[in-house]
Amino acid sequence: MTEAGIAVSDFRRLVLLGAGGPGFWSNLEAFGFYSDDPVDHYARHLTRRLLHDFLGDPPSLLLYPGGAAAPSLTRLGELAGWGSPSPVFVGIHPDYGPWFAYRAAFLIDLDLPVDEVAPRPHPCDVCLDKPCLSACPVGAVRWPGPSDIDTCARSRIEDGSPCADRCLARLACPVGAEHRYSLAQIRYHYLHSLPTIRSYYATQDK
Ligand code: SF4
Ligand code: SF4
């Protein structure tokens, strides 16, 4: 039993779903933007379809998004061998670079085959020029880290910030550049985070 009261032993597998590249967003545009959080809404819809249409509706428990617990997706992704923390405040994948995301995680009582992912070098360790470092206009990106999330966040809410709706450092990363999200998706995610950042600093700076 976990701290969140989940009987993990009732399930045989933990499934992590991720999406790399711009396909998730194109499919979301075709599906439609519903609810206050259309991305999570669509991820839950896909998870339900996967369970029902392809896996025969076995006993399952959604953890994320909006499920019974909030696991560390970054840690799960590392354990799965998919992604590692990067200096640009998102995970980095050896093929998709910083253009992928974990979309759902659930427990399932089904004997699914377990993915075996061979270890690969961290992309940032083998990135010779590290263009993300010089692309950040406020010097918040560092490797080896940690990068400076406070400097980044404060600069993003300044009037006229070039980072209000995008991260110039992330855009400069050469890994997986062919999988880069559309500008519409990039703007959606970055603009979505601004009100939370503003309200956080409004409280902190009182
Ligand atoms: S530019 Fe290089 S160091 Fe920077 S995030 Fe991409 S791979 Fe890592
Ligand atoms: S959003 Fe802007 S300030 Fe923040 S890390 Fe990216 S480039 Fe630097």
Image: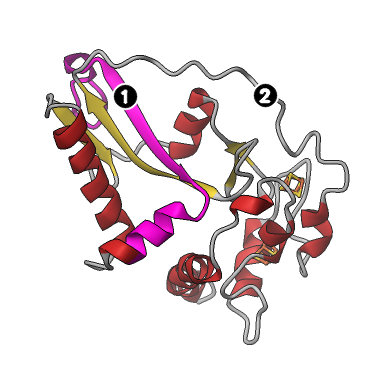
> Marks 1 and 2: in contact by CB < 8 Å?
no
Q: Nearer the viewer, residue 200 or 121?
A: 121
Q: Nearer the viewer, residue 33 or 14?
A: 33
Which comes before the other along the chain, label 2 or label 1?
A: 1
Residue found at x 31% / y 64%: 30
Give the magenta-colored segment's residue range. Answer: 1-29
Label 2 packing within 10 angstroms: few (<14), some (14-19), many (20+): few
Q: Report the Cα–Cα distance between label 2 and label 1.
A: 22 Å
Evaluate whether residue 106 shows in this view. Answer: yes
Above or below 138: residue 161: below
Residue furthest out toward the right: 129
Query: What residue did someone put label 2 on?
Result: 120
Residue found at x 50% / y 77%: 206
Q: x and y percent of residue 36 in the render?
A: 26, 68
**Mark 2 lies within 8 Å of ligand 1 (Cβ measured):** no
Q: x and y percent of residue 31 in the render?
A: 27, 62
User: Callout 2, which amino acid?
Assistant: Arg
Is residue 73 highlighted in magenta? no
Query: What residue did someone put label 1 on?
Result: 14
Report whether 100 appears left or right of 120: left
Q: Which mark's residue is nearer the viewer, 2 or 1?
A: 2
Report whether 95 appears left or right of 109: right
